[in-house]
């Protein structure tokens, strides 16, 4: 059986180094990636899953906030990814949000962000590294707990913003030890999970690979359902 095709959104500025690592994680777990971004073709008809990748802060105008400390914004990418996230969920396409992508998933479903999360939760708690030095506690009875287990786990942190008010149909699936939201997920299908950390950098950890494996499995199921539906329509035509 061919590998499910997962679209991966990236920034024009940093995508050259981010995308290969995400694609490696997809390949290891049975999928294959296709890089998308501003100026690139984005056709949901031909993909089986969607990853919204990390990058610049999300513009506060998307969720009714005020422009404050955000130093680097990408409005074109904001518009593209919000539309893609909303359209993918409407079509039942599985979605994984990574860091900025997790925040975008929340915003696409009507949620808001804390623009200066480290001021809110204490600058002494700030950790900014690709190394797994931040401890997160996974909520019991969540999709994330089924994917990666309920034990606390060490993750990395490269963000300045964080989820504030949850979007419609979402719940919190992990927080760090200071209470900051570190993962969100959609309560019902389709599969939609957002993690504030960067699991692509932690591909050597089986609990992080499991996140990509869960997306690939959901994408494979989506493709199977889509193909069966298409076959039935052709028979009835």
Image: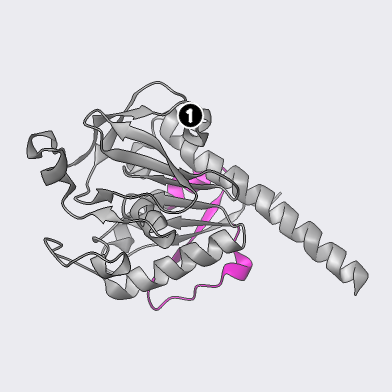
Q: For the residue carrying disc 1, how many other residues have a C-alpha within 10 Å: few (<14), some (14-19), or many (20+)?
A: some
Rendered residue at 22%/46% (across/down): 158
Q: Is residue 237 above or below residue 196?
A: below
Magenta-colored span: 23-48
- Give the image quarter of residue 136: top left
Number of marks in the image?
1
Nearer to us in this view, 173 or 101: 173
Left or right: 60 as drawn, with respect to 143: left
Q: Which quadrant of the view contains residue 175?
A: top left
Judge by depth and name the residue closer to the eye, 206 or 104.
104
Which residue, as the protein is rendered here, is positioned at the far top? 151
Task: Tell me how the rendering is colored.
Answer: one colour
Q: In this rendering, would 223 be left or right of 27?
A: right
Q: Nearer the viewer, residue 46 or 76?
A: 76
Image quarter (top left, top right, bottom left or bottom right) of the C terminus: bottom right
Using the rendered image of the protein, determine whether residue 206 is visible from the camera's viewpoint.
yes
Left or right for 17, reference 91: left
Q: Residue at x 28, y 73 (%)?
A: 75
Q: Position of residue 203 (x, y in %)?
A: 39, 37
Q: Position of residue 4 (x, y in %)?
A: 61, 53
Q: Residue furthest right?
A: 236
Identify the residue under disc 1.
145
Query: For residue 44: magenta?
Result: yes
Residue drawn at the location 50% of the way across and 53% of the way down? 95
Q: Position of residue 34 (x, y in %)?
A: 49, 62
144 relative position to 115: left or right:
right
Asked which secondary structure carries label 1, the reply is helix
Q: Is residue 29 visible?
A: no
């Amino acid at each position: 059986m061919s590998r499910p095709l997962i679209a991966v959104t990236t920034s024009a500025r940093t995508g050259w180094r981010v995308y290969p690592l995400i694609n490696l994680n997809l390949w290891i777990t049975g999928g294959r990636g296709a890089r998308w971004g501003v100026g690139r073709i984005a056709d949901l008809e031909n993909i089986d899953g969607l990853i919204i990748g990390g990058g610049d802060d999300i513009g506060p105008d998307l969720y009714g906030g005020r422009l404050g400390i955000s130093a680097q914004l990408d409005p074109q990418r904001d518009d593209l990814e919000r539309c893609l996230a909303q359209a993918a969920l409407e079509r039942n396409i599985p979605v994984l949000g990574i860091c900025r992508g997790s925040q975008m998933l929340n915003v696409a479903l009507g949620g808001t962000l804390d623009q200066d999360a480290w001021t809110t939760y204490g600058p002494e708690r700030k950790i900014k590294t690709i190394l797994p030095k931040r401890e997160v506690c996974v909520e019991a009875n969540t999709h994330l707990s089924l994917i990666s287990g309920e034990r606390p786990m060490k993750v990395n942190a490269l963000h300045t913003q964080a989820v504030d008010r949850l979007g419609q149909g979402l719940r919190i699936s992990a927080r760090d030890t200071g209470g900051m939201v570190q993962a969100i997920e959609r309560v019902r299908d389709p599969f939609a999970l957002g993690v504030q950390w960067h699991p692509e950098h932690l591909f050597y950890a089986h609990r992080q690979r499991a996140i990509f494996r869960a997306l690939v499995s959901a994408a494979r199921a989506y493709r199977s359902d889509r193909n069966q539906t298409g076959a039935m329509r052709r028979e009835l035509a």
